[in-house]
Image (tube, helix red, strand yellow):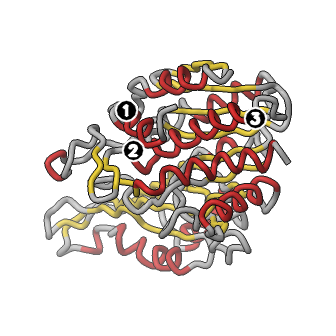
């Protein structure tokens, strides 16, 4: 069996910029076929997805991940070729090193080792791999989950291999994520000459009091698992570029990262109420990128946290911070979903990397979690 390092390198060497899998998934299928995993490729539009499973009995433990990576950015700013995995100063460099080809390599070999050591284990082990996580996320995990659910495949536990660790391997496990709701607001005014303001309606002036109220509103106070819901303006544009013209419209793009104490419907209603109270003429388009999900402390988080402690001595903290992930789709058909992987400090950055000493422990944590759930 090759090491986690070797397999991680082999995956990084595939330039799988979203939505291109670049041949990563066939490597997994070939690797795990030797220990009895059956593979199925599910293609939706331009996205290739892989479903691997060994066994038919409950409980079913799923490892989920994505082979696609974000674009490299300016190649001249990288110290090494992003698709030529390079060991340097105790780190492995390459696009996807932390997000999340090391996790895929680690849980693949962890499953291989577990099945080899315990061929008569109870339950089932499966893997759900997509190449659409870093992109629009419309033809990947969400459609695979719908397809599997339609044929009544059951999940009991799912570990998503996202890079969750903060300062040291194992310090953070995500047991949920906030929802993401975006709005594109167009405020309507009347264009005119700045010297004749009585003949114009300045949409910026009209919007300003409402905007202040939106930024100061307490949307909720969060709960024991989630921080309070936040509202942030990400883009604001108005004007023609001339200094003597009152603009005719103002466009604002904003985003809510929301807890389970709020719903998309309640947030929309409150935003519209504030805008209407200020007698603003506007159009508002909404986009729901993901609903929040939460897995309360249970068998999966306990098994994973115990595996982390046994392997590293670190006491993991359960957290719901950060952006969205494919966990939001899996949580709709799986009662317990958590995310765990390596340190995330360099993800999506130039010179993305992972500590070489983290690879073997990461694999062992995944294997220990299987042991805690399927042998005890």
Residue hosting label 1 = 16
Quadrant in the rendering for residue 29:
top right
Give the vertical position of 48 relative to 102 (above or below): above
Q: Residue at x 78, y 50 (%)?
A: 372
Q: Spatial distance from mark 2 to mark 1, Cα to Cα?
A: 9 Å
Nearer the observer: mark 2 or 3; the answer is: 3
Front residue (pair 260, 344): 344
Which type of secondary structure does the marked residue at label 3 adopt? Answer: loop
Pointer 2 with pointer 1, Cβ within 8 A: yes
Give me the disc on residue 118: 3
Residue 36 in sight here: yes
Direction from residue 283 to residue 205 in the image, left or right: left
**x, y percent for residue 228:** 63, 74
Compare marks 3 and 1 and give the one earlier in the sequence.
1
Compare marks 2 and 1 and give the one earlier in the sequence.
1
Residue hosting label 2 = 96
Compare marks 2 and 3 and give the one earlier in the sequence.
2
Give the vertical position of 34 relative to 130 (above or below): above
Which type of secondary structure does the marked residue at label 1 adopt? Answer: loop
Front residue (pair 95, 218): 95
């Amino acid at each position: 069996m090759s090491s986690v390092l070797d397999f991680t390198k082999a995956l990084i060497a595939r330039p799988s910029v979203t939505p291109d899998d670049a041949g990563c998934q066939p490597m997994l299928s070939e690797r795990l076929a030797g220990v009895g995993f059956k593979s199925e490729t599910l293609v939706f539009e331009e996205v290739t997805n892989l479903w691997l499973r060994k066994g038919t009995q409950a409980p079913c433990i799923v490892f989920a991940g994505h082979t696609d990576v974000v674009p490299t950015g300016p190649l001249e700013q990288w110290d090494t070729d992003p698709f030529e995995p390079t060991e340097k100063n105790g780190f492995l460099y390459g696009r996807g090193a932390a997000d999340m080809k090391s996790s895929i390599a680690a849980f693949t070999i962890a499953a291989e080792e577990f099945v080899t050591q315990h061929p008569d284990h109870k339950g089932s082990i499966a893997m759900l791999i997509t190449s659409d996580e870093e992109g629009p996320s419309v033809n990947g995990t969400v459609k695979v989950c719908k397809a599997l659910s339609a044929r009544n495949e059951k999940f009991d536990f799912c570990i998503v291999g996202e890079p969750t660790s903060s300062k040291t391997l194992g310090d953070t496990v995500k047991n949920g994520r906030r929802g993401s709701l975006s709005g594109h607001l167009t405020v309507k005014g009347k264009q005119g000459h700045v010297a004749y303001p009585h003949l114009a309606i300045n949409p910026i002036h009209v919007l300003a009091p409402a905007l202040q109220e939106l930024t100061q509103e307490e949307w909720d106070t969060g709960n024991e698992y989630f921080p309070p819901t936040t509202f942030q303006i990400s883009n604001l544009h108005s004007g023609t570029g001339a200094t003597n013209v009152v603009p005719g419209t103002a466009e604002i793009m904003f985003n809510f990262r929301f807890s389970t104490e709020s719903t998309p419907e309640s947030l929309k209603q409150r935003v519209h109420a504030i805008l209407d109270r200020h007698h603003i003429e506007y159009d508002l388009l909404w986009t729901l990128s993901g609903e929040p999900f939460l897995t309360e402390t249970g068998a999966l988080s306990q098994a994973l946290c115990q595996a982390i402690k046994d392997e590293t001595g670190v006491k993991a903290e359960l957290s719901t911070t950060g952006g969205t992930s494919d966990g939001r789709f899996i949580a709709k058909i799986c009662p317990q979903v958590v995310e765990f992987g390596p340190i995330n400090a360099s993800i999506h950055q130039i010179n993305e990397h992972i500590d070489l000493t983290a690879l073997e422990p990461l694999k062992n944590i995944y294997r220990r979690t299987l042991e805690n759930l399927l042998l005890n």
